[in-house]
Amino acid sequence: MVTFLITSAVIVTILGIAVYFWQKPNTSTESASLPLNPPSRGLFSAGPASEQASSVEEPISERLKITILERAAAGDKTALLDAHSIKDQELYSKALDTLTMTADSDALVLSLVSYLTRSELPVTPHLAERILEGWKKSPDRSSTAKTLHIVALSNDASLYNSAVEAALQFWREGRLGDVSPIELSALIDGEYWILSSQVRSSGAGFLLKRTLANARRELKAQTHVNQ
């Protein structure tokens, strides 16, 4: 009987200890869990990382512009493609004007123009003026067509007006003897439409329209005389 009581007491004690440990909260597991809402350190966080990245972007852009202009100064025509691809009109104009200034012969200027037309790149008035200067030395049928086209691509109404007036003067002097009045009239009218609508409707565009109208009348009258 005594043995039975002792055994029962031991069993009850063991069960009590087991129940105690089973109901005790697992504080160690909870304390080991990760903290909530850790500070963001990713690429898209608004913290110091993103501020540092934005401060680096601008100097890189400026270095790119400087590099493009240096390449243009060294005669590298491909710098124009890079300037045009980043859609910076001012940078492109500076690069092209730099290449134009370094072209110290008519042959180099024509080579530059050829590169632009093949690459479908814009023409600046500065380059168009160089083309006009070279053309006036020895105008002929082919160079006249090319010059009027290049000048029109510069999108400068005043400059195109000067080119048309020069072509008419050369024609009157007989320096374009292989160009008929009909052909010259069609040429100057056709290239006119390369100019943008904004340029055509400007004040300089109005003066250009008057020059073209006078040229048409003169060339038409000469056509009737030749017939």
Image (tube, rainbow, N blue to C red):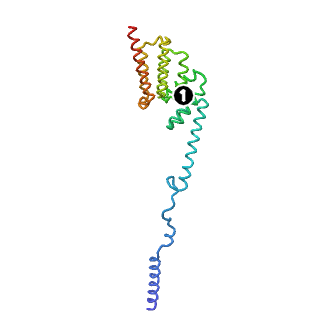
Q: How many marks?
A: 1
The residue most toward the bottom is 2
Q: Residue at x 56, y 49 (%)?
A: 55
Is 22 or 203 nearer to us in this picture?
Answer: 203
Instruction: From the top left corner, tell me how far across and down residue 31 is, in percent.
Output: 51, 70
Is 204 or 67 nearer to us in this picture?
Answer: 204
Quarter of the image with the C terminus is top left
Is 57 or 126 nearer to us in this picture?
Answer: 126
Quarter of the image with the N terminus is bottom left
Q: Residues within 10 Å of mark 1 (few under 14, many from 20)?
A: some
| Residue bearing mark 1 | 126
Amino acid identity at mark 1? His
Residue 87, relative to residue 5: is it above or below? above
In the structure shown, which secondary structural element does the residue marked by tag 1 occupy? helix
Instruction: From the top left corner, tell me how far across and down residue 126 is, in percent.
Output: 54, 28
Residue 14, relative to residue 154: is it above or below? below
Instruction: From the top left corner, tell me how far across and down residue 122 is, in percent.
Output: 49, 30
Is 221 or 55 nearer to us in this picture?
Answer: 221
Q: Residue at x 59, y 38 (%)?
A: 66
Instruction: From the top left corner, tell me how far across and down residue 85 is, in percent.
Output: 50, 36
